[in-house]
Structures are given as C-alpha cells and as structure tokens.
Image (cartoon, coloured by chain):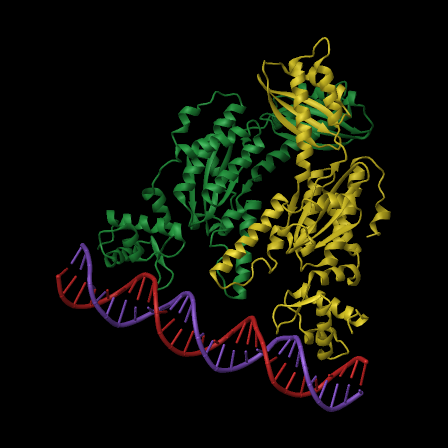
Chain colours: A green, B yellow, C purple, D red
Amino acid sequence: MGAELTERRQHILKLIVQEFIETATPVASEVLVKKYGLSVSSATVRNEMGVLEDLGYLTHLHTSAGRVPTDAGYRFFVENLMDRTPLSSAEQRTIRHQFYQVRGELDQWIQLAGAVLARKAQNASLVTPPRADQLRCKNVELIAIHDTMALLVLVLHGGTIKQQTLTLETARSQEELRRISARLTERCTDSGAARLEEILAQMRVETPPPGELELQVLETVVRAMHQYEEQQQEQIYSDGLIEMLSQPEFIPALTREEDRERAVERVRRAMDILKSGRGLGPLIPQALASGGVQVVIGGEHSADELRQYSVILARYGIDGTVSGVLGVIGPTRMSYPRSISTVRYISLVMSDLLRDLYGVETHMSESDDTN
Amino acid sequence: MGAELTERRQHILKLIVQEFIETATPVASEVLVKKYGLSVSSATVRNEMGVLEDLGYLTHLHTSAGRVPTDAGYRFFVENLMDRTPLSSAEQRTIRHQFYQVRGELDQWIQLAGAVLARKAQNASLVTPPRADQLRCKNVELIAIHDTMALLVLVLHGGTIKQQTLTLETARSQEELRRISARLTERCTDSGAARLEEILAQMRVETPPPGELELQVLETVVRAMHQYEEQQQEQIYSDGLIEMLSQPEFIPALTREEDRERAVERVRRAMDILKSGRGLGPLIPQALASGGVQVVIGGEHSADELRQYSVILARYGIDGTVSGVLGVIGPTRMSYPRSISTVRYISLVMSDLLRDLYGVETHMSESDDTN
DNA sequence: CTTAGCACTCTCGCCTGTTGACTGCTAAAT
DNA sequence: ATTTAGCAGTCAACAGGCGAGAGTGCTAAG
C-alpha cells in the first residue's frame, strides 16, 4: 500500500502545519496549491492528505472542512520538518541589549526573560528562579525592629534573601543582636541545611550553653531553609497570560450560553495552570535533568489539564552550581520554530548572566551563535 | 409634576438595583411585583420606573427590555438605599483566623487580603503595601558574594528590605565590608532620604576622606531609597482577575468575529488596569488622604479606561506612621453592599496587624464591631 | 500516478416568520 | 388623584429554511 511517508507527503504535512499555525483555520487542499504554488493539483494533494490522515498525522473536524494536524503531526513536524533557523542576529542583539539594561538584578532578569519569551512566542511564558543545587547559607543578620521584635535576614549563596520577623522573649539591644548574628554567621557560613542541623544539635549540648535566642534564631534559619527548598520546587514566575488568551482557541466567537461558560472555564484553567503550575510538576525536573530544549505536545502530557497545551522548556544555569528552567506554554497550535529558538536563545543568555553573577568567566561570543 | 423621589420610588429603585446586580439581566416590572410581592400592579411599577428614568436613575437599552440602573442610580443606591449590614461575626472570625495563620509575614498579609477581597466580592482586588509616611533607613548590610561583587541589603523601618548587587572596584574581604556597614549603619540609622543626602555631602568634604567604597555604598543607598519611594507610588498588588473576568460583562455570549475581538480587547484592558494600575493614579492618594470607604462609580472616574468600572477603596494603617490602600474593582454592576463591608472590615484587620507589627497596642475588640 | 469533474456533505450567513418579553398608553375603577 | 386592567406596539431572541460556498471523496479518463 501507499502508506509510507514519501518526501512529498512530508512536504505537504509541513505546509499544512505551518499554515494552520498561522491562520488557526483548517487547511484546504486548494489553499496549499495556490498559496505555495505546488506543481500538482488540489486533487493530488487531497489524496496525499488522505494518506497522511490514515497515518495519523492529520484529522478532520467534519467531512467538509480542511485538515488539522494531530499531536502526532506536530510531533513529526517538530522532529523532522520544521526550519530550525536561530533568531536573527538583530533580534539577538536587541535581547542582549535589554538584559544589559537591567544588569545586576536577578529578579529583573527573570521578569525580562518572561516578557521576551511571551512576546516573541505570543504565548505565556514560565521561568523558575535559578535554584542552587544545594542551598548554602552565606550570612545571618538580625535587625531590631522594636523591643521584642527583630527581623531575621538570611542571605544565601547566589544572593537570594529570605526574611522573617522574629518575636523575642526578652528585649535585646541592637548591639546584642549584632554580636549574635556575627557569631552565627561565622559558624554557619557555607553550610547547607543538613550541616546546619548538625550544628544546631551540637549547640544544644554545648557547655557553656549558648543563649536561648541563639538557638531560636538557628532553628528559624533551618526552618526557613527547608521551607525555601520546598517553595523553590513550586515557585514559577509567569508572564504573557494575555498573549496566550488572545489566541483564538481561548475566546472564540461563541453562540450559546453554555459555550460562554466553557470559555470562562477554559480561561480559569489556563490562569490556574500559570498561577499554580498545576500539571507542570513532572516537567520541570525533567527539563532540569536534560540539556537541550524539551517539547511536550498536547496528549503527550501525563496531566489531563495540559492535553490542549504544548510546553517548551529549557534548562539554564551553570552545571553543578545553579540551574533553573524557562519556557513557553500555549495551545498545541503554537509556532514551534519561533518558540523553540527563542527559548533556546534566552536560556543561553540567562546562563551567561548567571556565570557572570557567580564569577565564572563567560563564553558569550562562543555561545551566541550555537543557537 | 410628579418628579420627586417618593418613598415608593426609592424602594423600587432599590429593588431594581439589587435585582440587576444579582441577575445581570435588565429588570422587568412584573419580575419586581412577583419576586418581591409588591402590593401594587406591574403597571404602577412601570409608571414609577418611567419617572425614575426621567430622573436619570435608570435606562433602557431598547424599548422593550427591562430597566438598568445608570451610574447615578448606583450612586443613589450606595448613598441612601443599600443595606449596610457588616460582615457576619462568623465571617469576621473566619477572616481573622486566616490572618492569624500567616502571622508575622507582611507579604502574606497583603496576599491574603487580596485573596479574601476577591473571593468575597467576586471581583478583582487591589492592595498597596503599607507605605511609611517617610522612609527611614534602619540598617545597612554588605555581604561579599565573591571578590569584586557584594550584596547591599538595606533595611527600612517597618521591615521592608531592598537589595542591590554592587560591583566593587577593588576586592574586599567580608571583614572589611562588615566594618564599613557597621559604620554606615551607625551614621544612617533613622535617617530619611533627605538627611542621607546631607550626610553624603558632608562625607565628601570630611578629613580624613572616607573610603571610596563607603561613598559608593551611601550613594547607592540614597539612589535605592529614591527609587523605592517612586516605585511605591505605583506598586499595587492585585488578585482575583479570574473572579472579575467570570462576570458576564467580560466574556458574554457572542456571535460575530468582531465581537470576539472586542471581548479580547476588553480582557486585555482589564488585565492592563490591574497590572499597571493605569487610570487608578488619582484614586490611591485620594483614598490615602481620607478616612472611610471611597466608592467611585463608572463615569465618575476621571480616567476614560475606567468608565465601565467601579472602584471601592479604603485606607488602612496607622495614622502618621504607615498607611496603604486596599479595595475592590469590578464592573459597575457589582455587589456594593458586600464589597463595601468586606473592604471596610479587611482594612480594619490590616490596620490592627500593622499596629501589632509596629508595636502599638491594638484595639481589636473595639474596632471589630464598628464595621 | 495524476487530474478533471462531479456528487455529496456540512457549515455559515441570511432571511423569515414567530414567539415572548416588556413597555407605554388609555380608559375605566377605586 | 391614583391605581390598574387591558391592549397595542416594539424589539430581541429563536427556530427553521434556503442558498451559497467550501472542501472533500470518488470515479473515470488522461
């Protein structure tokens, strides 16, 4: 039978995917012939489309409408057909420049990365803050707020800051607090959570016994680090909700009241995914583990709530030191070429910035063009 | 003529507003009679509605649809007609309890306030962080990140923290940084931005001249404080976007393609207002200045983009020390009674919490019931 | 293997008449 | 003078029907 994937069929599949991504309407045989100047007739294209449908790469909404790619169709497109042109060097320069302007502020890098991703991909973006492979304490500061209340500022390697207010059992002067934090910083600097617990255990049996406040602070530090470690898993910054919602799959032209509710529900789900990261759980560690750009399309997701979405993720950071994940999420009909090259490029830029921050020599000029 | 606002007309207006808020569909004369068991006929109600329309409190979309309140109608309702029942004490307790659970974390209070407001009012909420009437520096800490890079942590009265990475011209040890920050803290503590500039000017001409790093740090501190002061103006936390977008005015049952674009545009505008606070500019200071709950309805807004919205704001905080603003925003058809009492109550709770944080004795038991 | 041609299917927009929801008016009733 | 029943008039919403158009799938000829 003629069920193998000939060159021409691949070409037609490619055109259909591109056309559908662009127009969001089912693609008809004649459109392909006219718009792309195929040297065969629409009838031939129809036959080929029939085969592609049998092979599972396309579907029909109903008898008389054009073809639409299936998840498998997108997958094949991403894997074998799509043009893998990197961002133009003009675009690269613009992006670098924007990052240059917010030099020195991690939070702003993250926001900027999210904004650029969203705008380029016309979909929502996800960025996790870079996570240290293991958290290490750098500094502990205590600051008096008033008599019986102090602010604990915990600085971690990499410059993240956690703060926590502390209720004191007895009033302390700023000078006392200073001494205590100096002592604790000395003892704790460079230690991870595990090591801190050891120190804490040891202090409990020390003679002379340390001040109760010292213990209280250290306990809080340990708790805060654990808490932060957990938070980190879930902490996802996102942007571009509106870009995604502008896609016609979210607010289509409706007719009935029940459709309205479906639309609202769809929007609610989308916001929920972005806000809580629901369903993204398994993807992040997966992206962290592997290099390169991960693409998960529609039904390939393990989570039901993502069946309508595709997610494109890449790891960024410094091997063995810190790493985060960033990417794009949108309906399966999204511009994979554009999204993938943007995600790839931004992950490079972020990695460079982090190397800078962590004092590793950067490889800007090399990495720029491996995109 | 019979154009004065008799008791009965007021009652009918009240019912219409309530009914419209609840159902979001124009209110017919007969519905009022049936649903609320009026002792007059629908014809009489119609006559009265006609008068109310002449007075400017109601409108007609077209001849044969029910009545809808105008902005003036809502205004009169809010001013004179609505039931001003406070939140039930059960609700009050639940809310207090939720705040109790996140004791000690200002950020979380703000988030929680936003979440509760949004859920109760079924609309979007706005919360500005409490702003000190004048910013005063509490503490300056320098933390070495690596050789030529340090983290400046600036703690302000009230426990806000600003951080900034600093590129050093020459390498410094943590010990040196410690000394410098100790010296600066001593000099700067309790000073506002103006005073800090004086100190800076003075230091420049001192003999012996202070280290260049010291000057650099102080400059950064001053810059950070100014920057923060400006940021504060605009910094608005918001939540409940989805609650607001679920209201039928945002994603109605549509038919045509052009309507779809209008809907998307509406959603975009709404998100824009919440994200950037566009149009809210004048409202915040106004709410800060006056006590009580401010209600601005539809066309009463000076900003065009808010013509379709109502905003309910209240100040919270401690007189003369810190204050912020919180409130609700939604379509003019929103539940004013519910929103207003929630806003009022949450502002009380937040004020209590702040008094606690700032070490002023609280008046919980008194204030609870003035709601 | 390709393609012209055609029948068939299904959507969409359009029109139509119809229904039903309200109003506004009028004239009688209170 | 106010209320109200009754009724005409208006308009949106809906359902059904129709035609046009879009696209396919098939067939038979090139």
From this viewpoint, is residue A327 visible? no
Which residue: 72% across, 15% down?
Answer: B203
Q: In this view, does B298 lie to the left or right of D10?
A: right
Quarter holding the N terminus of chain B is bottom right
Q: In this view, does B64 lie above or below A139?
A: below
* Residue B137 on image: x %, y %: 74, 27
Q: Is residue B78 left or right of residue B122?
A: right
The image shows a total of numbered marks equal to 0
Which residue: 76% across, 40% down?
Answer: B323
* Displayed quadrant of residue B237: top right
Q: Is residue B52 above or below residue A298?
A: below
Q: In this view, does A304 lie above or below B51?
A: above
Who is closer to the viewer here, A33 or B158?
A: A33
From this viewpoint, is residue A252 visible? yes
Who is closer to the viewer here, A57 or A36?
A: A36
Which residue: 67% across, 49% down?
Answer: B125
Q: Which residue lies furthest to the right in this view?
A: B366
* Residue B233 on image: x %, y %: 68, 38
* Residue A207 on image: x %, y %: 75, 18
* Residue B222 on image: x %, y %: 69, 25
* Displayed quadrant of residue B339: bottom right
